[in-house]
Amino acid sequence: IKMYQPLSDGVPPISTIGWQAPQDLQKFLEGFYQYFEVKGFRGIVALHVSHIIALSFTIVFSFVLLFLIDWEAILSCDSEESCQSLSIWYAWHWQNLGLRRWLVLLSTLIFSLYWGFNVYQMVLVCMQACQMRSFYKE
């Protein structure tokens, strides 16, 4: 029975079963604390999914209010008779958008990219939470 292994034999393979030391201790402890703070995997998933849903609603609602509704027609309405024949929706023409609607379209695109970044972050955090769950269970 050998009590030690010479370095010339190489490093023995590390077992993939069980807990291993984290590469980045600060990131591990932040994930550990967040897992504890929101009371587990379900709490982390619920927190991030609700954030994505709220952000989605905000982006879509803002787009509808600022891009699709014809506010000039609504504000020019002065009597019930003139308002009944009024269409509150812009006609969907790309030729006559105007600067304000182009800016709204550009900002919606930028916020959609931000939404995508948040979805990516949610996936990363949920993967880390899966690792924390296995750490807690061991």
Image (spheres, grey):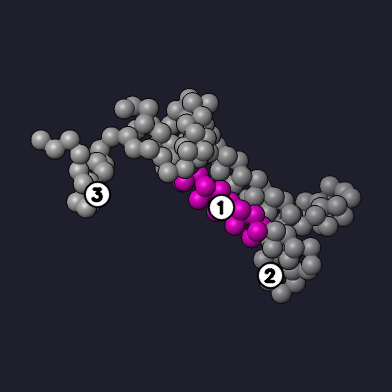
Q: Which residue is mark 2?
A: 93
Q: Identify the amino acid type marked 1.
A: Phe
Q: Is residue 76 above or below residue 13?
A: below
Image check: 24 left or right of 78? left
In this rendering, is residue 32 above or below 110? Answer: above
Three-letter amino acid code at disc 3? Answer: Leu
Q: Relative to the observer, which residue lies in front, 18 or 121?
A: 18
Residue 117 marker = 1
* Residue 46 visible in the snapshot: no
Q: Cα distance, mark 1 to mark 2?
A: 30 Å
Q: Residue at x 17, y 35 (%)?
A: 3
Using the numbered discs, state the Cα–Cα distance from disc 3 to disc 2 in whole angstroms: 74 Å
Residue at (42% x, 44% y) in the render? 23
- Within the magenta stretch, is there residue 1? no
Tell me if mark 3 has few (under 14), some (14-19) or many (20+) residues whose alpha carbon lies within 10 angstroms of its own. Answer: few
- SS state under label 2: loop
Residue 53 in picture, x, y percent from top left: 56, 42
Q: Nearer the viewer, mark 1 or mark 2?
A: 1
Using the rendered image of the protein, determine whether residue 132 is visible from the camera's viewpoint.
yes
Callout 2, which amino acid?
Answer: His
Q: Which residue is mark 3?
A: 7
